[in-house]
Image (cartoon, grey):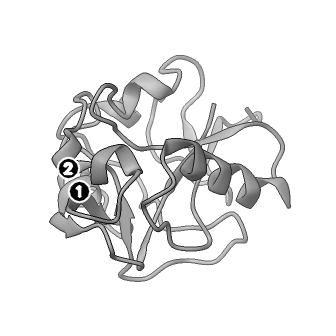
Amino acid sequence: MNPKGWRVFASTASFFPGGGLAVADAQCQADAAAALPGSYRAMLATSTASMASRFSTTGAPWVRIDGIPLVAAAADMFVANGRLVAALDLTSAGTFLLNYGGWSGSTSPQMAGTLAKTCNDWTSTNGNGIGGRVQYTDFTSMQAFDNPLDCTNTADHLYCLQQ
C-alpha cells in the first residue's frame, strides 16, 4: 500500500481465458513488476469465491497509479451496486484505455460467479463469461455490461488490485 491507499490498475494487455485464476494473477503481477511495489491479484470471481473475498476491505481506499482515488474507503470497492469516484481505466504503464472491456465473472463483487459465467473458472475458452467496461464508474456497467461475453474474446482486460 502506498501512503494514499491500495494501488489499482487495468492490465496493460488483454486477458485470454484458458489458464485459470493463477494466470490472471500472474498477468497482474507482471504488469506491476515493472513499476509498482507489492503483490497484485486480478479482481475476478470464480464459481467458489467472490471478487471481494480475494482482497482486504480495511485500511486506506483503492487508488489508481496516478493518485486518483477510486473510492472513499477500501470497503466501498466491493459494495454491490456501488459507484466509483473515477474509472478503473488506467494501466500500470500510465496509459488510459478507452472503450475496452474488463473481465469480472459476476454481476456483483460480493457474489461468486458460476462455471457458466467465469469461462469455467477462467480455465476454458468454451462458453461465456461476464465482463464490463473500464470507462464506467457504476459497478453494474464496470462489472457486467457485457453479459454474456464469449470466452474467446481477446479484447477484455483485467482489473488488478494490490493485496
The tag on residue 117 is: 2
Task: Give percent across and percent down for residue 109.
Answer: 29, 35
> Badge 2 local density, few (<14 within 10 Å), some, or many (20+)?
many
Q: Nearer the viewer, residue 81 or 149?
A: 149
- Quarter of the figure with residue 146: bottom left
- The three-letter code of the residue at mark 2 reads Lys
- The three-letter code of the residue at mark 1 reads Ile
Quadrant of the image for the N terminus? top right
> Badge 1 local density, few (<14 within 10 Å), some, or many (20+)?
many
Task: Give percent across and percent down for residue 106.
Answer: 23, 43
Report helix, strand or loop for mark 2.
Answer: helix
Disc 2 or disc 1, which is closer to the eye?
A: 2
Residue in the picture at 20% in, 34% down? 80
Q: Is 78 drawn above or below residue 10 in the view shown?
A: above
The tag on residue 130 is: 1
Residue in the picture at 33% in, 36% down? 46
Task: Give percent across and percent down for residue 88.
Answer: 46, 59
Any part of residue 35 in sight: no
